[in-house]
Amino acid sequence: MTAPEGTPLAPTAGAEAGGLSGKGLSAGTVGLIGAIVIGISCIAPAYTLTAALGPTASEVGVQVPAIILVGFIPMLLVAFGYRELNNRMPDSGTSFTWASRAFGPWIGWMAGWGLIAATVIVLSNLAGIAVDFLFLLIAQITNNPGIAEIAADPLVNVIVCLLFVLGATYVSYRDMQTTQKLQYVLVGFQVLVLVVFAIAAIVHVASGNAFDATPVDWSWFNPFAVSSFSAFAAGLSLSIFIFWGWDVTLTMNEETKDPDKTPGRAATITVITIVVLYLLLSISLIMFAGVGTGELGLGNSDISDNVFFHLSGPIMGPLAFLVSLAVLTSSAASLQSTFVSPARTLLAMGHYGALPPQFATVSPRFFTPGYATIAAAIVASVFYAVMRFVSVSVLTDTILTLGMMICFYYGLTAFACVWYFRKQWFDSVRNVFFTFLFPLIGGVILAVLFVTTLIDSMDPEYGSGSSVFGVGLVFVLGVTIIVLGIVIMVWQAIRRPAFFRGETLSLDAPPSARRRRQTAANRSEKP
């Protein structure tokens, strides 16, 4: 007897923590607070805002709070869709698994690829930021500005970056308890410093010591005051980037307590917490520095890639090093926690036969996806090393490319929610909003942003101004990543046709039959 469409599958024999099929992960090790902390860590508020606040202010001026709120809307709407899918089908494959169940194996594979590509890009980006702030912090502590310039040496930069990745890989390879304990300390410290930073900026404004005191106005919250749609889209793309990462709470669903409810609640609470923190910081820094192009103005392109570092001295005085330490902590913590998503997605893809069976390997000691974690680390390291020598402004280009990939796989997942629950849309008023309207609107917004960014990024001046044969590097990166995913998918379909025939992860196959077929497929591939 097969399960009717929209009906939750019963767990397979030996399934852990309510997953569609048990993968050997350590069940029940992450609680609600732990999931929220890891979610905040993956978003990395200190790192993301110092990198995105300047470029966003350059695009939309004082409407930064409005853009943050507008960027928050599709994230929240998509989070509702993720929650519904997780309640019905908790599985570490998240976007990959859900899109496969909704649209079939081909679209599901590309959704998984989008998530993996986005996380690999950001892993390399986080490591690069950690390198920059390590040398900045040393320069501040020693009062030797020349030390900060060492990070600009490509060879030194790449070597130190690889050391950061190595450390993060080691922690991620170990059990989830180690990850949680480390994140409690790192996340608590960065949030505390950011709140103090924002309050200190407001105190300077109140005492008349601000660089360019700008009174708060309700127009700051009006998105229609942005000068053009292109500026609005660019600002919104950056805004979405600063919220990205909350879905890590869902990829841990087979390791959380109460996997049907905890991951969805953690995702919603994480997103709301982050938007409050971002609004506090953006408003306080606009009040202090304004959005002009002066020495400390947020519109000054010379400081846009690292706003917090340039403002920390004038705002925090002798405690300025704490801000640099917070950003270093943020990027290092996020580097470690971000490994959770690609590793578990690769694990699920290997488990269901969409990738080689080695990716389904779980460490017998730590119950973590060891092979997948190491594979993600190697790819991220190679990607960063290559990009560091191709583009001087590697961080700017990878952030914009990341925004495209976020829109790509978040959008697919939102549409998967809408389609999967299509026969239950009107069963209740709640279903109308949470399985239909909310994820549909969120998905449409992300789809429009993806297309807009794709078109705009063809301009050689887009992003850092780097180009390949007259075409913007951001466009080249985005298209190359998607085409590469299609090529690998076709190759896997030739090598592993069972998944692409819907035999290992399909809507109609009962779990016991699916598990038997997958076990047989994996055995047949082993030498």
Image (cartoon, rainbow, N blue to C red):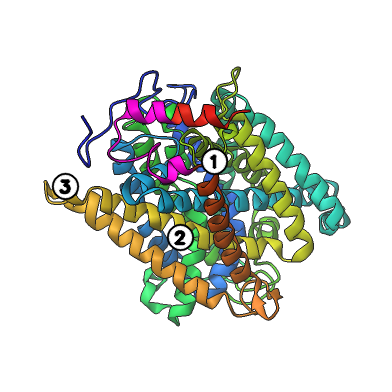
Q: Is residue 511 visible?
A: yes
Question: Disc 1 designates what residue?
Answer: 355
Above/below status of 73 relative to 449: above
Q: Is 507 a magenta residue? A: yes
Residue holding disc 3: 424
Q: Which residue is mark 2?
A: 407
Callout 1: helix, strand or loop? loop
- Placement of the C terminus among the 4 image quadrants: top right
Q: What is the magenta range?
A: 497-517
Residue at 32 percent of width and 56 percent of height:
415
Where residue 307 sits, quadrant-wise, is bottom right
Instruction: Indicate the position of residue 309 as horizontal and vertical percent values.
Output: 69, 57
Find the distance from the CA under tag 1 to the CA under tag 3.
Answer: 32 Å
Question: Which of the 4 image quadrants contains residue 330?
Answer: top right
Left or right: 218, with 177 as reference point: left
- Pointers 2 and 3 in contact (CB under 8 A)? no
N-term mark: 2 or 3? 2
In the image, 257 versus 289, the foreground residue is 257
Pointer 1: residues within 10 angstroms few (<14), some, or many (20+)?
A: many
Tell which circle, 2 or 1, labels the residue nearer the N-terminal end.
1
The answer to whether residue 289 shows anywhere in this view is: no
Is label 2 in a helix, a strand or a loop? helix
Identify the image quadrant of residue 48. Answer: bottom right
Relative image position of residue 337 (x, y in whole percent) = 57, 38
Q: Are marks 2 and 1 in contact (CB under 8 Å)?
A: no
Which amino acid does the dot numbered 1 rest on?
Leu
Foreground mark, 1 or 3, reads 1
In depth, the one of 289 and 213 nearer the eye is 289
Within 10 angstroms of label 3, few (less than 14), some, or many (20 or more) residues? some
Q: Position of residue 313 (x, y in %)?
A: 70, 56
Quadrant location of the N terminus in the rendered image? top left
Could you tell me how far apart the alpha carbons at marks 2 and 3 are, in whole angstroms? 26 Å
